[in-house]
Image (cartoon, rainbow, N blue to C red):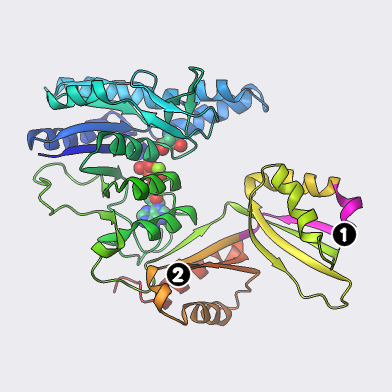
């Protein structure tokens, strides 16, 4: 008997038939004698509609009211799933974020979970009742509804699993695990049986939206075993005896056969800013990045060109696409002080990354990457690295070509 947290994402609860299919997975676990807390997302793309309504209501709006609106999607799923489970003879009830409660900080729209009260839940679970909890939402210190940022239901599920001390957190989604590349653009991608927390953290933060980055951080810190699996597989005859498909996100030393590269990720969510003709002297970088930091704009990759004349240089860096207009605005305001010649911004770029824990002990991964991209005529505009990843910035038009080329290069293609 195990204590499980099961999370069902948007496509897995997109309509009543999908919710019934989710309920069958839950019933299978209950029938096997397990205790189940369930976290649900809003149905299909309901959250997108709710977000667009808030924008239509007023382009600039109160973030507290935004949260009131966008958190409702999960509440609908939560009630419907509870009704369907009860109708199948499975005792179940909904527990909204404020009822548990799930305490968060007050950063509306991007709140962080601080603590989840689980005493009531634990005794109900012991009696065989399924607790159905809406993902994505919490309660601020002053009692208002908060949301955790897009994709936040993953984080709700992992935080609940950590608070309950669950044996495992199953993330049911529309793919049957973590692949070596986004299966939507890499047809030959392979499913991984296991991936380490660190690799998953890089994969998520470098663009694979299959898990929210924060959820992987929490899983790593609290040692929650995460199993990413498909809700589209039949619930029948798949008793959890280890014979399930899916990808386990776990500690590195649980993975016997380590590969040098475990996957390729990409993101179109970044924008490039270029300052042309800035003075090449000490203190200039601080004068560029200081005002950006003051405006809470995160800078990712940075490249400073070698100065030809020793007097001026060009500086290129990336920010998230959502911050581009603000970043340009901030830099225009300090133009007199910085004395640059020109300022340019572009969203026609993509960041492609190669990830693998094996890179720590294996040389040559970067040079192979640069050569393969050069052979395809793809120009690299910026590079950044960490111990276990290499990212390059390239023209958006080459995104898919680059991802597929690198996927083959490192032998990841499914034969
Ligand atoms: P949910 O609605 O269940 O939260 P998401 O749409 O957020 O699901 O995440 C699942 C999607 O993540 C998949 O449909 C897939 O296209 C995408 N994805 C991106 N990169 C990967 C990857 N490396 N492995 C698996 N899925 C990936
Ligand atoms: N419904 C929310 C979103 O679409 C949270 C989630 O599904 O994870 O972002
Ligand atoms: Mg998701």
Q: Is residue 32 visible?
A: yes
Foreground mark, 2 or 1, reads: 1
Q: Quadrant of the N terminus?
A: top left
- The foreground one among 390 and 122 is 122
Q: Which mark is residue 340?
A: 1
Q: Which residue is mark 2?
A: 404
Q: Residue 107 in the image: x percent, y percent? A: 55, 30
Q: Position of residue 84 (x, y in %)?
A: 21, 23
167 is higher (above) or lower (below) than 386: above
Do the residues under discs 2 and 1 have CB atoms within 8 angstroms?
no
Mark 1 crowd level (few <14, some 14–19, many ≥20, 10 Å Cα): some
Q: Please, what secondary structure does the residue beneath circle 2 have?
A: helix
* Image: 182 above or below 26: below
Q: Residue at x 27, y 34 (%)?
A: 18
Quadrant housing residue 129: top left
The C terminus - image quarter: bottom left
Residue 190 quadrant: bottom left
Q: Is residue 339 magenta?
A: yes
Q: Is 248 left, or right, of 280 in this rendering?
A: left
Please, is residue 143 above or below residue 217 in the view?
above
Could you say where residue 309 lies in the image, as x and y percent from the top left? 88, 77
Q: Nearer the viewer, residue 164 or 9?
A: 164
What kind of element bears circle 1?
Answer: loop
Q: Is residue 183 visible?
A: no
Q: Quadrant of residue 92?
A: top left
Question: Is residue 207 within the magenta segment?
Answer: no
Q: Which of the four quarters of the rendered structure image does ligand 3 lie in?
A: top left
**Bounds of the magenta segment:** 334-349
Drawn side of residue 265 relative to residue 313, left or right: left
């Amino acid at each position: 008997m195990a204590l499980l947290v099961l999370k069902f994402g948007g496509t897995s609860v997109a309509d009543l038939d999908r919710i019934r299919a989710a309920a069958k997975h839950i019933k299978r676990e209950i029938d096997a004698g397990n205790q189940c807390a369930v976290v649900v997302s809003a149905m299909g793309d309901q959250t997108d509609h709710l977000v667009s309504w808030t924008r239509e209501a007023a382009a600039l709006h109160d973030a507290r009211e935004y949260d009131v609106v966008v958190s409702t999607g999960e509440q609908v799923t939560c009630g419907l799933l509870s009704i369907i489970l009860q109708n199948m003879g499975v005792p179940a009830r909904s527990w909204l974020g404020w009822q548990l409660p799930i305490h968060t900080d007050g950063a509306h729209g991007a709140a962080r979970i601080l603590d989840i009260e689980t005493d009531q839940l634990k005794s109900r679970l012991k009696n065989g009742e399924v607790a159905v909890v809406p993902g994505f939402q919490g309660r601020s210190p002053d009692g208002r509804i908060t949301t955790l940022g897009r994709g936040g239901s993953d984080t709700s599920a992992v935080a609940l699993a950590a608070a309950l001390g669950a044996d495992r957190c199953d993330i049911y989604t529309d793919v049957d695990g973590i692949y070596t590349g986004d299966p939507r653009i890499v047809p030959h991608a392979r499913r991984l049986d296991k991936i380490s927390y660190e690799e998953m953290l890089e994969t998520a933060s470098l663009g694979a939206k299959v898990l929210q980055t924060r959820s992987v951080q929490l899983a790593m810190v609290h040692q929650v075993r995460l199993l990413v699996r498909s809700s589209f597989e039949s619930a029948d005859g798949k008793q959890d005896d280890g014979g399930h498909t899916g990808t386990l996100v776990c500690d590195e030393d649980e993975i016997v056969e380590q590969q040098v590269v475990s996957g390729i990720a990409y993101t179109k969510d970044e924008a490039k800013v270029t300052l042309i003709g800035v003075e090449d002297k000490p203190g200039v970088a601080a004068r560029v990045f200081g005002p950006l930091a003051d405006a809470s704009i995160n800078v990712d990759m940075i490249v400073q060109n070698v100065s030809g004349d020793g007097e001026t240089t060009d500086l290129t860096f990336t920010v998230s696409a959502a911050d581009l207009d603000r970043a340009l605005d901030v830099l225009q305001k300090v133009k007199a002080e910085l004395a640059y010649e020109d300022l340019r911004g572009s969203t026609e770029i993509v960041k492609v990354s190669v990830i693998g824990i094996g890179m720590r002990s294996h040389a040559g991964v970067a040079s192979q990457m640069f050569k393969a991209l050069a052979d395809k005529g793809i120009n690299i505009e910026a590079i950044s690295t960490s111990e276990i990843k290499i990212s390059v910035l390239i023209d958006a038009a080459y995104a898919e070509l680059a991802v597929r080329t690198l996927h083959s290069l490192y032998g990841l293609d499914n034969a």
